[in-house]
Image: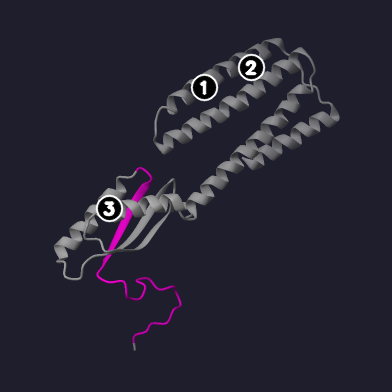
Amino acid sequence: MATLGLQILFESGRELLIKAQPERDPVKEKWMIGIMVSVTLVKFVLMLYCRRFQNEIVKAYAQDHFFDVITNSIGLGTAVLAIKFYWWIDPLGAILIALYTMGNWANTVMDNVWALIGKTAPPEYLAKLTYLIWNHHEEIRHIETVRAYTFGSQYFVEVHIVLPQDMTLPQSHNIGQTLEDKLEQLPEVERAFVHVDFDTIHPPEHKPKGTPSSSP
């Protein structure tokens, strides 16, 4: 999209510099206006329809339709003004569309980059998870770790909890499993992983790569 925007910028700038006025054909102009009005109306209706859903994919369609409505409206408006008044309004409108396209998609790219690199959840969301975990079961003695990081538009959650040492395996498994299920019911959570410990005095479960082993 950035390449397309740059190409439009260069071509529109060239037309302004050499004053390349387009040939006028009233029949083609009427067809152009009719087609652009029809497409813009269809895109507007699709945008309203897609905004009714909470699915992230459908929301992306709504954003795409909104982008088309804006660019088509600017293109149609500047084309009509160029026909009625001054020819240079049309390439000027193309420059505005190009700048809007580049800015809009740059923001989209940045948003998706942050989602794909595993950005940690904000502190208030981690606090919400911690509160939910602590009140999940009365036998939870300690919350060792709560992590949440982006996975697409949602979060992966990692939790380490401490249960009584004398608790049976079925009991501890049930507490961990029900906690996973509860966390995954949150709309922002894609997947939850709960690890159960019996004390807080132990080395980390996952060592950084390159760390020498303590075993002989």
Q: Is residue 189 magenta?
A: yes
Mark pair 1, 2: CA separation:
18 Å
| Highlighted range, magenta | 187-215
The answer for how far apart the CA atoms under marks 3 and 1 are is 46 Å
Q: Give the image quarter of residue 10.
A: top right
Residue 91 is situated, as x and y percent measured from the top left of the image, at 75, 27
Q: Residue furthest right?
A: 18
**Does residue 154 lie above or below 83 as drawn?**
below
Q: Residue at x 53, y 50 (%)?
A: 113
User: Which numbered mark, 3 or 2, is in the foreground of this view?
Assistant: 3
Amino acid type, mark 3: Asn
- Tell me if residue 190 comes above or below residue 39 in the rendering: below
Q: Earlier in the sequence, mark 3 or mark 1?
A: 1
Label whose residue precedes the other's in the sequence (1 or 2) = 2
Residue at position x 75%, y 18% in the image: 82
Q: What's the residue type where badge 2 is placed?
A: Met
Q: Which residue is mark 1?
A: 44
The residue carrying mark 2 is 32
- Residue most extreme to the bottom: 216
Q: Measured along the vertical axis of the image, is residue 156 above or below residue 210?
A: above
User: In this figure, which residue is indicated by the disc labeled 3?
Assistant: 135
Q: Nearer the viewer, residue 215 or 173?
A: 173
